[in-house]
Amino acid sequence: MSALPRISKRLFSSSSLLRNRAVIYKENGPISKVLSAVTYPSLPPPPPNTVNIKFILSPINPADLNTIEGVYPSKPTLSSNLNTSGKGSQEEPVFVAGNEGLAEVVEVGEGVSGLEKGAWVVMDKPQLGTWSTSRNVTPKDIIRLPFGKLNGLSEAHGATMTVNPTTAYNMLDSFVPLSAGDWIVQNGANSAVGKLVIQIAKIRGINTINFVRPRDNLAGLVKELEKLGANKVLTYDELSDKSLRGKIKEWTGGKDIRLALNCVGGDTTTAMVKLLGQNAHLVSYGAMSKKPLSLPTSLFIFKNLVSRGFWQTRWSKENSRHKKEALIGTLAEWMAGKKLKAPEHEIVTISKEDSDEVASQKIRDVLTRVSEGKVGKKVLLRLDSTDA
Amino acid sequence: MSALPRISKRLFSSSSLLRNRAVIYKENGPISKVLSAVTYPSLPPPPPNTVNIKFILSPINPADLNTIEGVYPSKPTLSSNLNTSGKGSQEEPVFVAGNEGLAEVVEVGEGVSGLEKGAWVVMDKPQLGTWSTSRNVTPKDIIRLPFGKLNGLSEAHGATMTVNPTTAYNMLDSFVPLSAGDWIVQNGANSAVGKLVIQIAKIRGINTINFVRPRDNLAGLVKELEKLGANKVLTYDELSDKSLRGKIKEWTGGKDIRLALNCVGGDTTTAMVKLLGQNAHLVSYGAMSKKPLSLPTSLFIFKNLVSRGFWQTRWSKENSRHKKEALIGTLAEWMAGKKLKAPEHEIVTISKEDSDEVASQKIRDVLTRVSEGKVGKKVLLRLDSTDA
């Protein structure tokens, strides 16, 4: 390949002849056993009504690990079109890992409108297999971003748009009618979603009371969250302080709090829920404490509390294409306008020089670090295209 | 008064000259300390736009005890019109106990239409003070029954209509759309509400899986509930049996169960909730175990479980007069048609010969028995009118 004359290499470099590497598994199981990076021959040009996309950055989300291990309710679909340039190939279908990612349109198949080479897209179809160099996809599998980097939207913004910001937006939008000046409470406020909740609430004029774990450098975290727009930041310890109700009444002017967002569970969540007024919703999207929700029945009966969950995957299935495009458009605009920060992140690059063996090891290493909670930031994978 | 000639006594006996006895308290506290039966002078004739009603039977519901003790969220209103025949009276306002009851219209004030002497009515206004002989009320405080005893509706039916049957009806009606052939689960199935759920579900063609505490004479209870229409009756112990899921799948033909009714709480409720399918509602209306609801967060996130409560008092506040009248009409029709059984009950009579002291002691005794759980049946109070 290095023998190819320079000019032809350039000619092919952004076309369908990108050699394709993908992080795959054939069955669910422990990451170190089932996962590997495999280089496939280049994809064929996109068939009619499909486009070829090249991934720019793809996050490693905690749910990705659960999906590979087989303990997540969302199952990936088997891919058999990774190297079937010849239709008669006997290729065994595999799962390609990765649910979220930012990609660029490389080549547009016949009959596709509204997408041109260079357009930035995010995934609409869940578990599409974003930990790969490139895929041929149908236009309905993806959602086009209204603009790219040049307009202030970074690659990291684009790569992390369809899971956390949509979750934060929809939890504020779907359960309780909130107006500017209303108050909400949330725990895990320094999680990726928690920080987005703070920022989106701020944009909408909604006030947030944010709970975090007690820690050594609390002041630093409080400052950071306040800078994002948090009105109040408290620790779970302060939840058991009897004076808290009085303080909150003062802050809210006695207005009932009607929305609590929860990604923790256990006792501190019970205490947080007791701060809510009549007809409130507790919306759970995670369970970091690994403890169940424990809620006094009287809250349900006499205060009309509603406890429910939010899962962006379900929202996405149940809502129209139009609504999803509008949401992505809104988020992209806020990100470009510097109203939503991209998450702090670390980029792990699998370069084209890495052998599949090296690439596999890199992936396994970073996934191990993520699963052990050793990475405080979002990890974004960059699979550099391996030119044919 | 006993010197009045017999004929005039008869003339007055069902008029506004009924002497009024009421079970009252001046402040919340332990029943034995705060509660007493007091005889007041007869009420004045009903002022314009009111009617005088005489209570026939009034249940003692568990919530009545909590209300008197001051630990129930629903507060009674102070009554100061018990003996103010003279407007300038310096009577201290008191609480009259009792929330539910069947009464008969005795005298109709000017300007009232649609209510005539002899009509049976139930209470619409909560905490109206039904543990008394008679009251002057406005027509909107009460709901007229479409027919009385002669049409198959017993006094016990009428007296117990506005709390338990409405709760059972509305829980089946308000949360999940249910069609004939659908399945629901409930615990505390042998409670008053549980038995009504079975019967109303039966009328609607909805199948019920009913959980009860293990007990010695289980077969007898199973038989009783099956006779009411229960499709399946199981004990909480059977909830932990792994084969149960398979059995239920067989019964339901694999159809998702989308409604669970709970008056127990604690572990067995958690186990019951795990039998539910996607998009189900857990509706709690009691907490007999005194343990909180403990629910895995994953059920909310991935199965879209919704946990909420039902309180008939709130339903009644939030729904139109028209809807409430229609509901009472439906229930009365079912009761008269022998489709809904009156609860097993014991009638405690405070006769007109009882002194206030004797009456007070009778009331306290029965309330103590109720609070100690020594009465397996519904207790209905009959305060015989003490003719003037």
Image: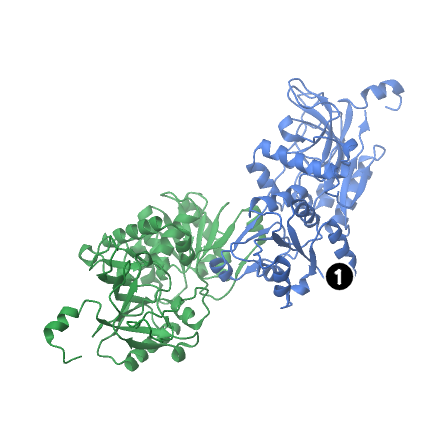
Chain colours: A blue, B green
Residue A356 as seen in the image, left or right of residue B223: right
Examine the rendered structure and indicate whether residue A358 appears above or below residue A92: below
Q: Quadrant of the C terminus of chain A?
A: top right
On the image, the x and y values in percent for residue A151 come to 77, 32
Of residues B50 and A285, the one drawn nearer to the viewer in this rendering: B50
Examine the rendered structure and indicate whether residue B154 appears above or below residue B205: below
On the image, the x and y values in percent for residue B317 come to 41, 55
Examine the rendered structure and indicate whether residue A155 appears above or below residue B372: above
Instruction: Identify the residue position indicated by label 1 in the image.
Output: A215
SS for dot 1 = loop
Of residues A81 and B3, the one drawn nearer to the viewer in this rendering: B3
Tell me where residue A134 sits by quadrant: top right
At label 1, counting other C-alpha atoms closer than 10 Å, the crowd grade (few under 14, some 14-19, many 20 or more) is few
Determine the residue positioned at 48% across, 48% down: B280
- Residue A212 in view, yes or no: no
Q: Quadrant of the N terminus of chain A?
A: top right
On the image, the x and y values in percent for residue A327 come to 63, 36
- Residue A275 in view, yes or no: yes
On the image, the x and y values in percent for residue A220 come to 79, 57
Of residues B322 and A326, the one drawn nearer to the viewer in this rendering: B322
Tell me where residue A125 sits by quadrant: top right
Residue A216 as seen in the image, left or right of residue B285: right
Examine the rendered structure and indicate whether residue B327 appears above or below residue A298: above
- Mark 1 belongs to which amino acid? Arg
